[in-house]
Amino acid sequence: MVCLGNICRSPLAEGVLTQKLADRGLDWEVDSAGTGAWHVGELPDSRSIAVAHNHNIDITHQRARQFQAKDLDRFDLILAMDSSNYQNILKLATSSAQKEKVKMIMNFAQPGYNQNVPDPYYGDNGFEAVYEMLDEACEALLAAKTNN
Ligand code: 4NP
């Protein structure tokens, strides 16, 4: 799960998918990162922590890290929150195999629309909407990759 700062959207995405996997008894490795380095080492934004908590998800063990080129080998699927994240990840890809792993997360919910998960950092009330989008996308991801 990749956004810009790894403090608002992608920590929520990591938490939402991790919860759904646990509910289904599936053992996937899920992680998140930001294309930028400004917040490395920080906890998720308190507003993301609060929205996750409201949905019975704890993300307070997470710490921000920067996305690295080697993540393109380490993970099977790299999910970008918006088109800017998507382009910045693709700049680090060196093979078609790596490029094919990179997807816009909302395309699992609405294929082909390239919809962005809006950056909620500078607003006050976008976090619940971000949660709802990620919940829908992660449900669709699991439906696509599994039988449940
Ligand atoms: P995120 O949100 O990419 O969803 O973690 C942001 C967090 C911090 C900044 C921008 C977006 N920032 O500019 O510091």
Image: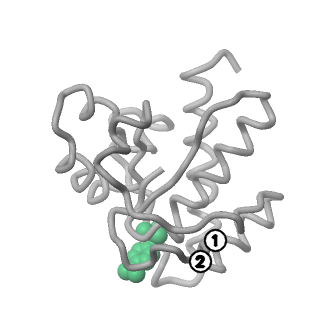
Q: Residue 55 location, x and y as percent?
A: 79, 59
Which residue does the image show at 23% across and 56% down from the upper left? Answer: 88
Question: Which residue appears at 45% of the width and 73% of the height?
Answer: 40
Scheme of colours in the image: one colour
Dot label at residue 130: none
Callout 2 touching callout 1 (CB < 8 Å): yes
Q: Describe residue 24's horizontal placement relative to residue 107 as left or right.
A: right
Is ligand 1 less than 8 Å from the beta carbon at label 1? Answer: yes
Residue type indicated by callout 1? Ser
Tell me: residue 125, above or below residue 64.
below
- Count the marks: 2
The kind of secondary structure element at disc 1 is helix
Residue at image mark 1: 48
Q: Residue at x 78, y 29 (%)?
A: 24
Horizontal and vertical percent position of residue 140 = 57, 32
Side (left or right) of 101 relative to 62: left
Question: Label 2 belongs to which residue?
Answer: 45
Q: Position of residue 85 (x, y in %)?
A: 31, 57
Dot 2 crowding, Cα within 10 Å, few <14, some 14–19, many 20+: some
CB at disc 2 and ligand 1 closer than 8 Å: yes
Q: Amino acid at mark 2?
A: Asp
Task: Label 2: state its secondary structure.
Answer: loop
Q: CA distance from mark 2 to mark 1?
A: 5 Å
Q: Say left or right for 49 vs 126.
A: right
69 or 77: nearer the viewer? 69
Count residues near mark 1 (Cα–Cα under 10 Å), then give few for <14, some for 14-19, many for 20+. Answer: many
When the figure is inspected, residue 21 is found, relative to residue 3, above or below; the finding is above
Q: Is residue 62 visible?
A: yes
